[in-house]
Image (cartoon, coloured by chain):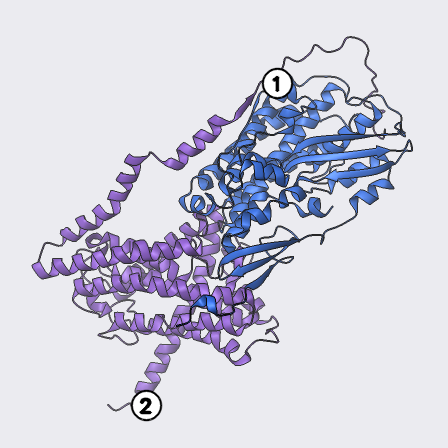
Chain colours: A blue, B purple
Amino acid sequence: MTTESQFETVDMMLNMGPQHPATHGVFRMVLKVDGEKVIDVIPHIGYLHRGTERLAEVETYGQVITLFDRVDYIANLNNELAFVRAGEQIMEVEAPERAQYIRVILAELNRVASHLLFIGTYAIDLGAMTPVMYGFRERERIQNLFEHVTGARMMHNYMRIGGVKADVPDDFVPWVRQLIGEVRKGVEECDKLLSTNEVFLGRTRGVGVIDGPTAISCGLTGPSLRGSGVAYDVRKDDPYEIYPYLNYKVPVGENGDCWDRYYLRMLECYESLSMIEQCLDQFPEGPIMAAGRRIARPPAGEVFSHSENPRGDLGVYLVSDGTDKPYRVKIRPPSFCNLVGLATMTRGSYIADAVAILGSLDIVLGEVDR
Amino acid sequence: MNVTLSDTITLSVQLFALFNVAALAAVSLVWLERRFLGRLQGRPGPNRVGPLGLLQPIADAIKLMSKEDVAPGSSQRLLFYAAPILVFVPAFVVWLTFPLARDVVVRNMDMGLFFFVAISVLSIVGLVLAGWSSNSKYAILGGFRAAAQLVSYEIPIITMILIIGMLSDSLDFVKVVDAQATIPFIAVVPLAFVIFLIAGLAEVGRTPFDIYFAESEVVGGPFVEYSGAHWAIFFLAEYVNTFVIGILGALLFLGGWRWPFGADLPQVASVALLMGKAYFIVLIIFWIRGTYPRMRIDQLMAMAWKWLIPLSFVLFLAAAFQLKFEWPWWVLTILSLVILVVPVIVQSRKQRNPALELAARYAANAIVVQAKPRPAPAVEDAPVVTPAAEGTSV
C-alpha cells in the first residue's frame, strides 16, 4: 500500500500578477501552492519604478513637491505634507497657523478618500461589488472639493515649503461642513453593508493573523500595525502641525487579522471627519505663507521627518548640500515596509486568503516601487 | 412508433422556438441584472444603447462575436472547443421538459424532474474539460473548484426535488404544479425552498458561491483562456442556468401557473404568471449578488456537507414519515420553520449579534488623545507675505 507521502509530488507555482485583478497595480507574487493551500509566497516588485528619489536630486525643492504627488497617488496631499514638512525643517521656516490648518484639513480629507478607496477595492477583492460604488461616490465628492481648492483632482501641487500655494476659496468652510455630513453618511452605508456581514466576517476574521511583536519586527506601520494591537500613530507619538490641538481617538485592534486591519480604517474615517470638524471650528484667519526667499538655498545638513499617511508612517530623509536642489531624498514608504509582513501572514492560508491579506495591507504600487 | 414528416417539422419548429425563448430569457437577464445592480449601487446602469439600454445585450453580443477567437498554443484544441458546447447544450436541453403553462411545453415527460437532474449535471464535465484543456493554472484551479462545488451541491438539489416528487406523487412537472393549486409547496416545506435556493445559487455559481470563476482569485477560472464567441457561449449558458433556477423554483415551490388563482388562467396569463414568479426568484439572486462577498472554497464545502446535506436528509425523512402516517400537511411546515428559526433564537440568546458587539468594542477601545489648549496667537509681527506675492515662492 503506497501513501501519498511516498510519491514524489511537485508543488505548483502559481504566478499572480503583474497583470492580475487583485494585486492592486503591478505587484507580482508567486505562490507556491499545494492544491488550494499556500505554502510560500515570493513577492516581486519593481514594475512601477520611476526613479523618484533620483529625480528629486535634479529638481529644486519646490519642484520635488510634484514628485511626491505621484509617490502614493491615492493620498497625494498627505505625501505633499510629508515632504513639505521636511523642507520646512531643513530651511528652518514654519508655516503660518492658517496654512497648517488648511493642510491638515486637506490631508485628513485625503485620508478619508484613500480609506474609502481601500474599503471599495477590498470588497471587490472579496467578491462584493456594491461597496466600491458607494466608496467611489463619496471619494468623488472629496475630489470635487480638492478641485475647487487646489485646481486639480489628484496631482495637486498645492502645498509649499512654508505654507500653501493659495488661500482657500470663500465658500471653503461651508462646503467642507456639508461634505463631512455627506461623506459620513456614505461611510456609514459601507460600514453597515460590509463590516458585520457574516460572509465578510468569515472571510476576514482569523485570516492573515500577525501578532504585535512580529508586526513591529516586520516594520509594519499604520492601520496594519495598529490592527495587531500596537498603538503607534505618528500623529499621537510625534505630533506635528496642529494635531496636538485636536481631540481624536486612535483605534486599536485585538487580533491582527484582516478584519481588524479593515475595520480600523473604517473607524479612522469617522475620526478623520471629526478632526476636520474641529479644525473648521478653530480655523484662524491670517497669512498662508511664511516669508521666504523665492529661490531657497537651505543650509547644508540633513533632516528626517515623518508623518502618518493613510497607509502608515511615511518618512522623508532629506540631505542638503547648500544648493537649491536636494543632495539626497530618501523616502521610507509605508506600503513597501508593510509588504514585508505579507509572507508571514500568507503562509498556510488558502489562495483566496492570499488575495484578502494582500488587500488588507492596502499597498499602492507607486509607493512600493517609487 | 411511426415518425411522420409533419412530426419532425413540428418538433423542429418547437425546438427553434424553445431555443429562442431560452436565449431571449438569458439576454433579458443580462439587461435586468445590470440595471437592477445599478439601482442597488446608486448608478444608472447601461442606458445609452436603445431605450433604457434595452439593446445593450445585443451590442455586447455583436462585440463578442466580432472579437478574435484566441486559443492558447498549448491547449488541447479539440477539447478546448468542445467544452463550451458541453456546457451550453445541457443548459438548453433541460428546457425541453419545462412547461411554461399547461400544454406550452415541447415534450411533457412523466419523468420530467428526473430528466432535469440527469441532464443538468452534465455541464460539470464541460467546466472541468474547459479548465483542463486550457492548459493554464488558473483554469485548472477553477475547473477543480467547479467539480468539487457542483458535485457537492447536486445532492441537496436532488434531495429537494425528490421531496417535491414525494409530496406531489409524481415526477411530472404538470402534476407537480397541479398539486399546488391551493397550497404552494413553499408553504408546505419552506426549508426545502431555502435549501433549494442556496444550492441553486451554488449550482449556477452566483455570488456568494462564484468561487470557481472568482475574478479576484482565479481570474475567470475555466473561462480564463476563452475569448470572443466561445466565451459568449459560456456567458449565455450561465444566464440560461440562472433562469432555469428561477423557472424551477417557480414550478416546484411557488405553484407554477396555478397558485394563487387555483383554476387555470388563459394560456398567455399562465405563462406571464410563471415568468413573473421566475423573475422574482432571479431578482432575489441578483439582490444577493449586490449584497454579499464571496465565500472561500473550504467554507463552501463545509456548508454543503455539514449543513445542507444533513438538513435535506432530515427533511426527506420527515416528508416520508408525513406521507406514511398521513399527518396533516402543516406538520412539515412547522418542522421546517422550527429548523429555520431555532438556530436564530439560539444564536441571539447566546450573544446579541456578536459582530455588532465586536465593532462597538473596537470603537470603545480606541486610545483617546486629548487636545492641548491652543496657544494664543503670537502678538509680535510674524514674518508675513501678502497672499498676492506668495504665488511662486520657494
Q: Amino acid at mark 1?
A: Asp
Instruction: Point out the frontmost of discs 1 and 2.
Output: 1
Q: Nearer the viewer, residue A36 or B34?
A: A36
Looking at the image, residue A303 sits to the left or right of residue B189; the answer is right
Q: Nearer the viewer, residue B77 or A315?
A: A315
Q: Residue A327: give x, y in percent of width and height.
A: 87, 37
| Quarter of the picture holding the N terminus of chain A | bottom left
**Identity, as a three-letter code, of the amino acid under mark 2:** Leu
Q: Is residue B20 visible?
A: no
Tag 2 residue: B5
Please say if the residues under marks 1 and 2 sit with CB atoms less than 8 Å apart: no
Q: Quadrant of residue B15?
A: bottom left
Q: Is residue B105 left or right of residue B389?
A: left
Chain ID of residue with mark 2: B
Residue B216 percent coordinates (x, y): 54, 55
Q: Quadrant of residue B278?
A: bottom left
Q: Residue B328: which disc?
A: none
Say the numbered circle drawn on residue A281. Answer: 1
Residue at image x 57%, y 29%?
A: A231
> Could you tell me which residue is drawn at 56 percent across and 34 percent down?
A226
Q: Is residue B132 left or right of residue B167?
A: right
Which residue reaches farthest right? A323
A87 to the left or right of A362: right
Q: Does mark 2 fall on the same chain as mark 1? A: no
**Viewer-proximal residue among A71 and A99:** A71
User: Considering only vertical position in the picture, is A315 above or below A101?
Assistant: below
Is the residue B133 above or below the residue A191 in the image? below
How many residues crowd mark 1 within 10 Å: few (<14), some (14–19), many (20+)?
few
